[in-house]
Amino acid sequence: MTEPLIFVAGHRGMVGAAIVRRLRALGHDNIITRSRQELNLLDQQAVSRFFAEHRIEQVYVAAAKVGGIHANNTYPADFIYENLMVEANLVHAAHTHGVQKLLFLGSSCIYPRLAEQPMREDALLTGTLEPTNEPYAVAKIAGIKLCESYNRQHGRDYRSVMPTNLYGPGDNFHPENSHVIPALMRRFHEAKERGDAEVVVWGSGTPRREFLHVDDMAAASVHVMDLAPDVYQANTRPMCSHINVGCGADVTIRELAETVARVVGFEGQVVFDATKPDGAPRKLLDVSRLSAMGWNAGITLEQGLRDTYDWYRAQGAEVRS
Ligand code: GFB
């Protein structure tokens, strides 16, 4: 009998790649991955065939259509359709082929726009979502409910983790479609190289965001996957089974911009473009559930930004497409 496999779906993405690194560092050599060309996760039959052909024991659902505030606002159909299809295909095929353990990765945008801060897990479905990413958020809420439903109806052990805003090596540095950290890192870097006097940052600079380095996210994901069922269940409930993952502290976008400028070495002015959307005013997660389960973030924002900038520079032009 072959050794059972750990399937990391989305291993070419920033988070999936970090989970693979983490699993390898822990000594796992039974990891299976598939590129988009090898397995189209939007294709239900192909996904089902893949599970039929391999002895899979655990699934990390790190495959997702992701992007920053502009991409979410511009391509809402892509964000809701692709995320719903990928998660439904993976969860259903995992169940059909007898996989007992799965970890679904969501996002802190599942919570209401004006949820009480820091946001606890039970704030889910208590209010109106942030409009710039509502389709994405609805797909991620559906993913949590898929997991809970297969657990309730079929006795599966499908868990969910909801990360705060992530960043790190392997991020997307597209000028418009990326998240704020890679967008600003690239803009400050290019401004420094050209000797520009100022850099434009979107919005008012007042929204607050919590940022977590992707290596911390990967460590938390493996930690939650590997918790004994009684420990996980003691800290969750059947209809509120997801776990927040964050570092427990946030900064304003202005403070973030100043920190990125310092890390990059840009010495000019930072100006704000108020015609661009701010999105949610604040998104800070309550991470006490995760902390009670024995995991806390370890990488500070400044350290993480330096690490990401080192990676960005090492990639050269490739990453700047
Ligand atoms: O990273 P970001 O797009 O994520 O934007 P969200 C965070 C904040 O940074 C917003 C501001 O207030 C932006 O207006 N910002 C400033 C910028 N300059 C820039 C820039 O050049 N690029 C970008 N992207 N932002 C996303 C959701 O929202 O968060 C996703 O749309 C996902 O669904 C992700 O949940 C974690 O936190 O606003």
Image: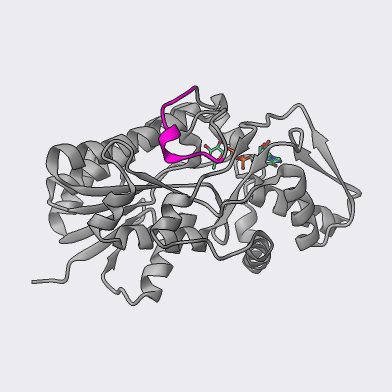
The N terminus appears in which quarter of the rendering? Answer: bottom left
In the figure, is residue 131 to the left or right of 309? left
Q: Residue at x 12, y 51 (%)?
A: 98
Q: Is residue 67 above or below residue 135?
A: below
Look at the image and say whether residue 309 sits in the magenta stretch. no
Q: Nearer the viewer, residue 282 or 166?
A: 282
In the picture provided, is 208 more to the left or to the right than 247? right
269 w.r.t. 137: above or below: below
- Residue under the image location 53 percent in, 47 percent down: 164
Residue drawn at (13%, 53%) of the image: 52
Magenta range is 118-127
| Residue 127 in the image: above or below residue 150 | above
Q: Main secondary structure of the magenta part?
A: loop
In the rendered image, residue 285, in percent from the top left (x then y), is placed at 53, 44
Determine the quadrant in which ligand 1 lies. Answer: top right
Looking at the image, can residue 186 be seen? yes
Is residue 79 something one can see in this rendering?
no
Q: Is residue 132 above or below residue 223?
A: above
Q: Residue furthest left?
A: 1
Judge from the rendering whether residue 126 lies leftward or rightward of residue 90; answer left or right: right
Q: How far across and down, in percent of the image, does residue 255 sit?
A: 76, 48
Q: Residue furthest top?
A: 128
**Residue 142: image x %, image y %?**
34, 33
Residue at position x 65%, y 59% in the image = 301
